[in-house]
Amino acid sequence: MASQIAQFLLILATIVSGCKANKPHGPEYDGMTMVTVADFSNLDGCTYLLKTASNEFLEPMNLNDSLKTDGLQIAIRFKPSKNASICMKGKPIDILSVKAIKQ
């Protein structure tokens, strides 16, 4: 019985540590939203959008050209934008700060 519990705990620890390894963590990411840059230029009125972990799309009004890479993962702080957009896919936002996610 004790060996079965030990095996279960070992498997559980492996799964949990594997999940955390794929997500950025640390104080430098506190309060930031993790997003993936997605090229939606084929959709009328859209360019690059940011996809959140909850599959929400954000339309950054001030995304730096160096970050316009489909699939790039970044962490951002943002606020709702007062600018209007004709892209109907994402909520307009203004990026306040951005960090590259260390893989």
Image (cartoon, rainbow, N blue to C red):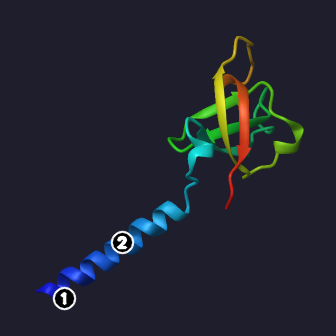
Residue 90, horizontal then vertical, whole percent: 64, 28
Query: Looking at the picture, which amino acid does disc 2 mark?
Result: Ala
Point 19% across, 80% down: residue: 5
Q: How many numbered marks have been drawn onto this rendered protein structure?
A: 2
Residue 15, horizontal then vertical, whole percent: 40, 70
* Residue 13: numbered disc: 2
In the orientation shown, which residue stands out farthest toward the left?
Answer: 1
* Residue 3: numbered disc: 1
In the depicted structure, whether residue 90 falls above or below residue 40: above
Position of residue 76 in the picture relative to residue 31 (left or right): right
Quarter of the picture holding the C terminus: bottom right
Point 75% across, 39% down: residue: 40
Q: Is any atom of residue 89 visible in this view?
A: no
Query: Looking at the picture, which amino acid does disc 1 mark?
Result: Ser
Residue 82, horizontal then vertical, whole percent: 70, 11
* Dot placed on the residue nearer the N-terminal end, 2 or 1: 1
